[in-house]
Amino acid sequence: MQTTGWLFDLYPLHDRMVLWFFTEGGRRLRLEDDFPYCLYLGGPQARLYSLARALGQKGWLRRAYPGRGRDLWTGREIPGVALEVKAYAFLPRVRQWLGTLPAEVAAYNCDLDIAAAYLYTRGYWPCVWYGLQAEDGRLLRLHPMEDAFAVEF
Protein backbone atom coordinates (compact mmCIF):
# COMPACT_ATOMS: atom_id res chain seq x y z
CA MET A 1 0.00 0.00 0.00
CA GLN A 2 1.24 3.46 -0.88
CA THR A 3 -0.35 6.59 0.56
CA THR A 4 0.34 10.01 1.99
CA GLY A 5 0.13 10.68 5.71
CA TRP A 6 0.82 13.24 8.38
CA LEU A 7 2.88 11.82 11.26
CA PHE A 8 1.08 12.88 14.43
CA ASP A 9 2.27 10.39 17.06
CA LEU A 10 4.87 7.73 17.73
CA TYR A 11 5.86 5.61 20.70
CA PRO A 12 8.01 2.58 21.53
CA LEU A 13 6.51 -0.90 21.89
CA HIS A 14 8.77 -3.82 22.92
CA ASP A 15 11.45 -3.64 20.20
CA ARG A 16 9.78 -1.48 17.57
CA MET A 17 8.18 1.90 17.08
CA VAL A 18 4.48 2.49 16.53
CA LEU A 19 3.72 5.41 14.23
CA TRP A 20 0.30 7.02 13.73
CA PHE A 21 -0.57 8.93 10.59
CA PHE A 22 -3.58 10.84 9.33
CA THR A 23 -3.97 10.07 5.64
CA GLU A 24 -5.09 12.64 3.06
CA GLY A 25 -8.53 11.05 3.20
CA GLY A 26 -8.73 11.66 6.95
CA ARG A 27 -8.21 8.02 7.94
CA ARG A 28 -6.01 7.10 10.90
CA LEU A 29 -3.24 4.68 10.02
CA ARG A 30 -1.18 2.74 12.60
CA LEU A 31 2.12 1.28 11.42
CA GLU A 32 5.03 -0.45 13.13
CA ASP A 33 8.71 -0.11 12.29
CA ASP A 34 11.52 -2.28 13.66
CA PHE A 35 13.94 -0.12 15.62
CA PRO A 36 16.70 -1.64 17.72
CA TYR A 37 17.76 0.91 20.34
CA CYS A 38 21.52 1.26 20.12
CA LEU A 39 23.93 2.69 22.67
CA TYR A 40 27.70 2.88 22.53
CA LEU A 41 30.62 2.26 24.83
CA GLY A 42 33.99 3.94 24.44
CA GLY A 43 37.26 3.08 26.17
CA PRO A 44 39.94 0.39 26.04
CA GLN A 45 38.86 -2.09 23.34
CA ALA A 46 39.61 -5.27 25.32
CA ARG A 47 37.54 -3.92 28.22
CA LEU A 48 34.66 -2.97 25.93
CA TYR A 49 34.34 -6.44 24.43
CA SER A 50 34.47 -7.99 27.88
CA LEU A 51 31.62 -5.71 28.99
CA ALA A 52 29.62 -6.46 25.85
CA ARG A 53 29.97 -10.20 26.52
CA ALA A 54 28.80 -9.69 30.12
CA LEU A 55 25.73 -7.78 28.94
CA GLY A 56 25.04 -10.42 26.31
CA GLN A 57 25.14 -13.17 28.94
CA LYS A 58 22.45 -11.34 30.88
CA GLY A 59 20.19 -11.67 27.82
CA TRP A 60 19.73 -7.92 27.42
CA LEU A 61 21.39 -7.50 24.01
CA ARG A 62 20.33 -8.42 20.51
CA ARG A 63 23.92 -7.99 19.34
CA ALA A 64 27.16 -6.07 19.86
CA TYR A 65 29.52 -4.94 17.13
CA PRO A 66 32.36 -2.46 16.49
CA GLY A 67 31.04 1.08 16.19
CA ARG A 68 32.28 4.60 15.74
CA GLY A 69 30.91 7.92 16.85
CA ARG A 70 31.91 11.57 16.92
CA ASP A 71 32.79 13.58 19.97
CA LEU A 72 30.21 16.34 20.33
CA TRP A 73 32.73 19.05 21.21
CA THR A 74 35.77 18.20 19.08
CA GLY A 75 34.19 16.31 16.19
CA ARG A 76 36.90 13.67 16.37
CA GLU A 77 35.99 10.07 15.70
CA ILE A 78 35.69 7.78 18.71
CA PRO A 79 36.04 4.01 18.24
CA GLY A 80 33.88 1.86 20.45
CA VAL A 81 31.33 -0.90 20.67
CA ALA A 82 27.70 -0.56 19.60
CA LEU A 83 25.16 -2.40 21.74
CA GLU A 84 21.67 -3.14 20.41
CA VAL A 85 19.23 -3.70 23.26
CA LYS A 86 17.00 -6.75 22.74
CA ALA A 87 13.83 -5.04 24.00
CA TYR A 88 13.11 -1.55 25.32
CA ALA A 89 12.06 -3.06 28.67
CA PHE A 90 15.72 -3.93 29.32
CA LEU A 91 16.86 -0.30 29.04
CA PRO A 92 16.41 0.62 32.73
CA ARG A 93 18.50 -2.41 33.77
CA VAL A 94 21.15 -1.69 31.14
CA ARG A 95 21.33 1.97 32.20
CA GLN A 96 21.63 1.00 35.85
CA TRP A 97 24.38 -1.49 35.01
CA LEU A 98 26.21 1.14 32.94
CA GLY A 99 26.22 3.41 36.00
CA THR A 100 28.48 0.92 37.77
CA LEU A 101 31.19 0.97 35.11
CA PRO A 102 34.67 2.33 35.86
CA ALA A 103 35.58 5.85 34.74
CA GLU A 104 37.74 4.47 31.90
CA VAL A 105 34.57 3.39 30.07
CA ALA A 106 32.22 6.01 28.62
CA ALA A 107 28.60 5.33 27.64
CA TYR A 108 26.99 7.26 24.78
CA ASN A 109 23.34 7.58 23.68
CA CYS A 110 22.23 5.59 26.70
CA ASP A 111 19.89 8.27 28.05
CA LEU A 112 18.12 9.29 24.85
CA ASP A 113 14.35 9.06 24.69
CA ILE A 114 13.50 6.11 22.43
CA ALA A 115 11.10 8.04 20.18
CA ALA A 116 13.57 10.93 19.84
CA ALA A 117 16.38 8.49 19.01
CA TYR A 118 14.17 6.89 16.37
CA LEU A 119 13.38 10.23 14.72
CA TYR A 120 17.01 11.36 14.82
CA THR A 121 18.43 8.05 13.57
CA ARG A 122 15.96 7.74 10.72
CA GLY A 123 16.03 11.43 9.76
CA TYR A 124 12.28 11.88 10.35
CA TRP A 125 10.40 14.55 12.25
CA PRO A 126 6.85 14.76 13.59
CA CYS A 127 3.97 16.84 12.24
CA VAL A 128 5.05 16.60 8.61
CA TRP A 129 3.45 15.02 5.55
CA TYR A 130 5.12 11.88 4.27
CA GLY A 131 4.76 9.63 1.29
CA LEU A 132 4.72 6.17 2.76
CA GLN A 133 4.73 2.57 1.75
CA ALA A 134 3.43 -0.12 4.09
CA GLU A 135 2.48 -3.77 4.07
CA ASP A 136 0.64 -5.81 6.70
CA GLY A 137 0.84 -2.99 9.25
CA ARG A 138 4.60 -2.57 8.79
CA LEU A 139 6.25 0.58 7.55
CA LEU A 140 8.42 -0.21 4.53
CA ARG A 141 9.41 3.26 3.33
CA LEU A 142 8.86 6.83 4.43
CA HIS A 143 9.93 9.99 2.63
CA PRO A 144 9.16 13.58 3.67
CA MET A 145 7.03 15.73 1.41
CA GLU A 146 7.83 19.01 3.12
CA ASP A 147 10.67 20.75 4.91
CA ALA A 148 10.79 20.25 8.68
CA PHE A 149 11.70 23.92 9.20
CA ALA A 150 9.29 25.48 6.71
CA VAL A 151 7.84 28.79 7.88
CA GLU A 152 4.65 28.36 5.84
CA PHE A 153 2.55 25.27 6.48
Image (spheres, grey):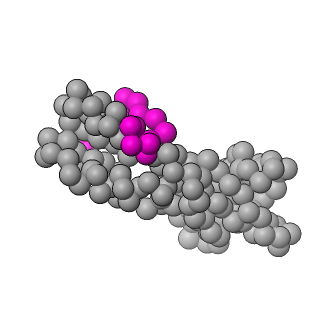
* Left or right: residue 2 compared with residue 21: right
Residue 37 x %, y %:
47, 49
Residue at far top of view: 46
* Left or right: residue 81 compared with residue 114: left
Q: Nearer the viewer, residue 9 or 152?
A: 9
Which quadrant is the C terminus positioned in?
Answer: bottom right
Residue at far left of view: 103
Can residue 132 be seen by looking at this rendering?
yes
Occupied quadrant, residue 53: top left
Can residue 145 be seen by looking at this rendering?
no
Q: Which residues are magenta?
A: 56-71
* Left or right: residue 153 compared with residue 106: right
Residue at 29% of width from left, 30% of height from top?
49
Q: Nearer the viewer, residue 14 or 28?
A: 14
Magenta stretch prevailing secondary structure:
strand
Residue at 72% of width from left, 57% of height from top?
31
Residue at 61% of width from left, 47% of height from top?
34
Residue 140 x %, y %:
72, 45
Residue at 51% of width from left, 51% of height from top?
87
**Residue 59 shown in magenta:** yes
Residue 92 x %, y %:
38, 59
In this rendering, the count of numbered labels is: 0
Residue 145 x %, y %:
69, 56
Occupied quadrant, residue 84: top left
Q: Is residue 49 above or below residue 38?
A: above
**Residue 69 shown in magenta:** yes
